[in-house]
Amino acid sequence: MRPKRSRPAASEFSPLWDPDFPAVSRRGTWAERDEREHGRPRLGRPPELDADRIVATAIALADRDGMAGATLSKVAAALGVTPMSLYRHIRSRDGLTDRMADTAFGLPPETDPDWRRALHAWADAQLAVYTRHPWVAQIPISGPPRGFNALAWMDAGLAALRSTGLDWGAKIGVITVVGGYVRQAFVTGRSLAERRLVEQFDEATALQVYQQEVAAQLDPGRFPEIEQLFADQAFADVPPDQESADADFRFGLDLILDGVDAAISR
């Protein structure tokens, strides 16, 4: 029997944000929080500056220039205000990045009754977020989910595993591993693609060059498995870049889900 874990093993789960990030309920959007705090809804023309506008501007800058382009000073300049004026709405740089990430992720897909299809859709949707907003993967993971959308993703991941019979520790472990895989697969794939772009190679050409360079340096018999890999021309039929990336992603995800299936069957 697996020992019951007292901790939520979610330190690597994606998306995860700062422990100081205020948890928000279903009524917890930023505008709704303002309504509660002021005791009345906003009427008439919206104020020139509010948290939603700051976050939207920061996301647009990050989409264009990465996180380096979404500093408080650059966000303020884009809004035509001073950096200090942002602190009336965003209490810190970390607070801004937390809200940016939570907004960028949006809500998760609907949960399929089949756990495997549900986790496939959950992972695919996260990969789509990283693809639309690559800067999200640059934000350090510093704690469990606290933003409304981040909590919705966590809840959807757990809901996908509802019928599996796994205990809570195992369910948290599964979504931790799957979420971490999606994030790392995106980061690795993007890094390789950027390098190929600089070298002006597609993946097939890059692998051929790699094989030639490594083979030229190998002492016969020193790395027999690699020698056989090259002799069998394993890199000869690499599909187009996007097709290859999709296949690699699905292979890794299915490998993880096969492990989940084995855990469910135990």
Image: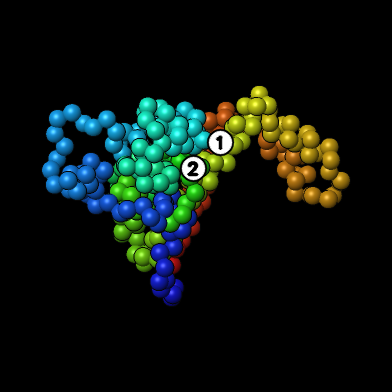
Q: Which of 251 and 106 is in front in this view?
A: 106
252 horizontally vs 83: left or right: right
Residue 190 has which mark?
A: 1
Local crowd size for mark 1, using a 10 Å CA cut-off: few (<14), some (14–19), many (≥20): some
Name the residue that disc number 2 marks: 137
Who's the residue at 36% across and 38% down the image?
A: 86
Q: Which of 73 and 135 is in front in this view?
A: 73
Tell me residue 19's x, y (percent): 40, 56
33 horizontally vs 147: left or right: left
Q: Nearer the viewer, mark 2 or mark 1?
A: 2
Who's the residue at 38% across and 55% down the image?
A: 20
Q: Can residue 143 be seen in this view?
A: yes
Local crowd size for mark 2, using a 10 Å CA cut-off: few (<14), some (14–19), many (≥20): some
Q: Nearer the viewer, residue 220 or 123?
A: 123
Give the quarter of the figure containing the C terminus. bottom left
Residue 250 has which mark?
A: none
Who's the residue at 53% across and 46% down the image?
A: 184
Q: CB under 8 Å between callouts 2 and 1?
A: yes
> Which amino acid, by three-letter code, is at mark 2?
Ala
Task: Give the image quarter of residue 126.
Answer: top left
Give the quarter of the figure containing the N terminus. bottom left
Tell me residue 81's x, y (percent): 37, 30
Pointer 2 or 1: first along the chain = 2
Q: Nearer the viewer, residue 88 or 193?
A: 88
Who's the residue at 42% across and 68% down the image?
A: 7
User: Circle 1 — which element?
Assistant: helix
Above or below: residue 214 compared with residue 206 = below
